[in-house]
């Protein structure tokens, strides 16, 4: 016992950074795509609404563990070469977009219709109504569940290990393969995930309470 | 003087329910018209058709020179010319009173900030709420919110103001402060169409009263028709109000 050394810890720390980086990429990519999904399903013409809802159902009904290899092994098979980071970011973004898009659609639709009507009667154009009246209110409603969902994103990045991406979970596995101290290693890995996720959970809960108080 | 609103034989169904049946009336510039009637008599629907929040099945509507029921309607321009105030105020909760009022002049009329600010303070003074400029709607009473909603419409200097049961959600004291604002507006010569349950107010301020019943204009005339109803329906309606 006691084979865990400084090099191992540095390796774990690198994995942690990749987990953070991949989480950010997934959140930004998934957020942008999810925003388009939310707008498309709230305001798009009938055809696009149908298409978007199909997209959401399709992605939500597919395991991330399938989406990841699909991007990493599937795209090269079609002649597109992708690095593990690009494949992981892409698969995670698509996965995240389906969930955030659905959450945000609900938030947009929970802004009372009368708000859009009032803005319409003040002669605001469609984009002005959405940008100045609907979205500011929807974003307020959306913040707590969005921050809450970021916890899921952080944890789901661990699945990127399936396509050879060395993030925190994979780094832990690799170290364990040489030190055979699974209990020590994976407790450390779990603690590091906890350090990343716990503040997000607390923030989400706090925002939720603040939001409820503001609306009482 | 030519009418600012011409409604000619409009009808409308919601599913199988006829809500408007051959409704016609005109509104002269500068006059105040009160539409009264029981809930479900079609009065709010008629009002909403004027601002094209509802479409009609048949008939014609002309408002401020816009052919509301025609194919080439410039909806944007119609909304610039017509202001509407709702029962539920519908202020924007994320904006202060001042921001609520300045939003449309800034975005629609492309007014510069100082100019929009000046207009906003002027209409706030008009409704007696200049001291609440930096408050959020949730910090105001219902009556104050409704007066802000009126000010918000006025800031766009509409040619016609529609009021859809604007005091129905307020207690008598708050109703009074909103009605006083509307009375002053009428005295200043604003053309107003109001759907209301305030018979005393209709009697006092309205130049014309339209009594709607079962989707039709049942009686139409000067406010004095309230004192001498020609039909049993209006007599019952006015009588129940006492």
Image (cartoon, coloured by chain):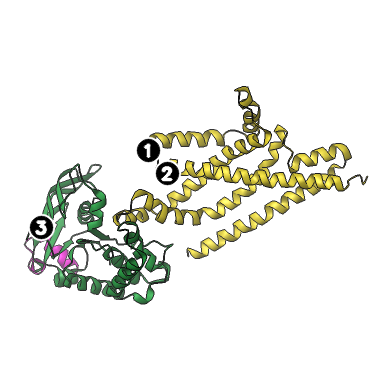
Chain colours: A yellow, B green
Q: Is residue B242 visible?
A: no
Disc 3: CA contacts within 10 A as few (<14), some (14-19) or many (>=20)? some
Asked if labels 3 and 1 touch by Cβ distance under 8 angstroms, the answer is: no
Q: Which residue is mark 3?
A: B3
Give the residue drawn at x 93%, y 45%: A1
Residue A44, horizontal then vertical, whole percent: 40, 40
Q: Which residue is mark 1?
A: A45
Q: Label 2 lies in what chain?
A: A
Q: Label 1 lies in what chain?
A: A
Residue A102, horizontal then vertical, whole percent: 50, 43
Vertical position of residue B116 compared to residue A81: above or below: below
Q: Check the image and name the residue furthest to the right.
A: A1
- Check if residue B87 falls in the magenta segment: no
Q: Using the image as rendered, state which of residue A204 and residue A21 is in the foreground.
A: A21
Give the residue drawn at x 40%, y 43%: A43
Q: Using the image as rendered, state which of residue A161 and residue B213 is in the foreground.
A: A161
Give the residue drawn at x 50%, y 57%: A140
């Amino acid at each position: 016992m006691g084979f865990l050394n400084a090099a191992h810890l540095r390796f774990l720390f690198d994995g942690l950074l990749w987990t953070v980086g991949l989480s950010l990429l997934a959140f930004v990519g998934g957020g942008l795509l999810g925003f388009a999904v939310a707008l498309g399903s709230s305001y798009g013409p009938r055809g696009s609404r149908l298409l978007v809802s199909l997209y959401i159902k399709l992605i939500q009904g597919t395991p991330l563990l399938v989406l990841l290899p699909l991007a990493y092994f599937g795209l090269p098979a079609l002649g597109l070469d992708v690095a593990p980071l690009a494949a992981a970011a892409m698969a995670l973004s698509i996965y995240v977009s389906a969930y955030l898009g659905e959450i945000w659609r609900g938030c947009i639709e929970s802004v009372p219709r009368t708000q859009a009507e009032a803005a319409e009667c003040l002669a605001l154009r469609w984009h002005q109504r959405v940008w100045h009246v609907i979205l500011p209110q929807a974003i307020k409603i959306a913040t707590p569940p969005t921050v809450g969902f970021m916890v899921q994103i952080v944890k789901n990045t661990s699945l990127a290990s399936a396509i050879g991406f060395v993030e925190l979970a994979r780094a832990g596995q690799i170290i364990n393969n040489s030190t055979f101290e699974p209990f020590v290693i994976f407790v450390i890995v779990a603690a590091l995930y906890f350090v990343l996720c716990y503040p997000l959970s607390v923030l989400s809960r706090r925002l939720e309470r603040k939001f409820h108080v503001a609306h009482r | 003087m030519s009418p600012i609103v011409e409604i000619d034989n409009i009808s409308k169904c919601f599913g199988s329910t006829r809500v408007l049946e051959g409704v016609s009336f005109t509104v002269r510039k500068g006059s105040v018209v009160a539409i009264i009637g029981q809930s479900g008599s079609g009065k709010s629907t008629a009002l909403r058709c004027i601002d094209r929040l509802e479409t009609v099945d048949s008939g014609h509507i002309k408002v401020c020179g816009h052919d509301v029921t025609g194919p080439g309607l410039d909806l944007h321009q119609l909304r610039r010319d017509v202001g509407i105030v709702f029962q539920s105020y519908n202020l924007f909760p994320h904006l202060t009173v001042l921001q609520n009022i300045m939003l449309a002049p800034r975005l629609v009329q492309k007014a510069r900030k100082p100019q929009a600010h000046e207009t906003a303070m002027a209409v706030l003074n008009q409704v007696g709420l200049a001291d609440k400029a930096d408050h959020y709607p949730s910090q105001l009473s219902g009556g104050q919110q409704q007066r802000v909603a009126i000010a918000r419409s006025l800031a766009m200097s509409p040619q016609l103001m529609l009021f859809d049961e604007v005091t129905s959600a307020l207690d008598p004291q708050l109703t009074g402060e909103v009605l006083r604002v509307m009375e002053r507006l009428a005295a200043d010569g604003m053309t107003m169409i109001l759907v209301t349950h305030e018979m005393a107010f209709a009697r006092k301020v309205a130049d014309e009263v339209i009594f709607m019943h079962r989707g039709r204009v049942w009686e139409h005339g000067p406010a004095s028709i309230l004192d001498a109803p020609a039909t049993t329906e209006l007599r019952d309606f006015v009588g129940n109000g006492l």
